[in-house]
Amino acid sequence: MDLYNDSHEKVCILSGIKETCITSTLKTGDKEITFEFRKTNRYATDIKEEGYIRTDTDEFVIKQVEPSGEWYKCTGTLNVEELEGKQYPQGFETVEKTVDECLTEAIDGTGWKVIRCDVSKKRTIRIEQNCSAWDVAQQAITTYRCEMVFDSLNKGISVYEKYGEDRGAYFIERLNLKRLQVQSNSYDFATRLIPIGKDGLMLNIDGKNYVENHQYSKKVKTMTWKDERYTDAESLKEDAEAKLDELSKPYRSYTAEIINLVEAVQDEEKKAYTVYGIEAVESGGEILSSFSDVFFDRQRAERFAELCNAGGLSLVHFPDAVEDALLE
């Protein structure tokens, strides 16, 4: 990892640090880094708030440095300063546009760009109070029901559709799992949803004004969802079905803290290099399938894991996907 001062001038390559942990939040695309360093570290006085930490894949802004015995603990957030700095004092609005069009307008002039977009649906974004381009992106994740990856090194945003269904397994890079927490509840559970759009717009599906989903339970529990941004019945129906797909099964969230992201090996000439593997892990933490030595590039490993999760890859097809990755 490299340390930069608040003027973005490189200070040093960090050494003598421990407990490095990067936490990713899929829902927002945000990331956080934490690590510890001794108070006697040569560069201890240079590691301070509003400086920058750069890894192989991301750049973080140092937000907190706190003492912990003979050590300091440093916390940094993903560097999206340009997006946070692009302000819309009167609010922001795009009407019936794709997420690509919406983001391109919101981030204009920031140096960021949309580098990939798999989502083609059109929706309306309306924020009526002061907001930033980052706020617009976060609202877009909710409105378009998509996932975003923010490349803070290359200032790029990738947008992915959320396909597939919950198969009780998720995929991670091969790494040391420090802690996995699973939370589950059904407080917002429903199997029937009545959506209402602008000016009382409602569905009429063979005389029914609701959508149903009994993937988890046969019981009928009805909920009403109103959102006046919808003026088109088909869009209202599509998003109501997507929303009910989430509501009609217990909510589960997974929080994983990871350390030691790489595996060091040696080739026949005793030269050290880094490789990454991939594992399919059951929601309870049990490893269902594992392949080592698949990727030499960390970004490819992370992207492969993200695509497996986003696409709801079946465990049956997991080996084929890994084989395809090896052939690329």
Image (cartoon, grey):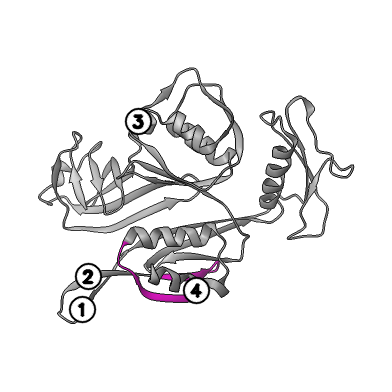
Q: Are marks 2 and 1 in contact (CB under 8 Å)?
A: yes
Q: Nearer the viewer, residue 3 or 123?
A: 123
Judge left or right: residue 302 versus residue 170: left
Q: Residues within 10 Å of mark 1 (few under 14, many from 20)?
A: few
Residue on which disc 4 sits: 320
Q: Residues within 10 Å of mark 4 (few under 14, many from 20)?
A: few
Disc 3 target residue: 110
Of marks 2 and 1, which one's residue comes earlier in the chain?
1
Q: Amino acid at mark 3?
A: Thr
**Quadrant assignment, res 290:** bottom left
Instruction: Indicate yes or no whether the magenta region holds residue 291.
Output: yes
Image: 108 above or below 116 = above
The residue where tag 2 is placed is 273
Q: Inspect the image, locate mark 1, and give the three-letter code of the amino acid beneath it.
A: Asp
**Front: mark 3 or 4:** 4
Looking at the rendered structure, the secondary structure element under dot 3 is loop
Report the quarter where the C terminus lies: bottom left
Q: Label 2 to label 4, Cα distance in Å?
A: 26 Å
Q: Residues within 10 Å of mark 2 (few under 14, many from 20)?
A: few
Q: Is 146 a magenta residue? A: no
Question: Secondary structure beneath disc 2?
Answer: strand
- Which label's residue is closer to the chain start, 3 or 4? 3
Of labels 1 and 4, the one closer to you: 4
- Which numbered disc flags the more N-terminal residue, 3 or 1? 3
Instruction: Say what amino acid the circle numbered 4 marks.
Output: Asp
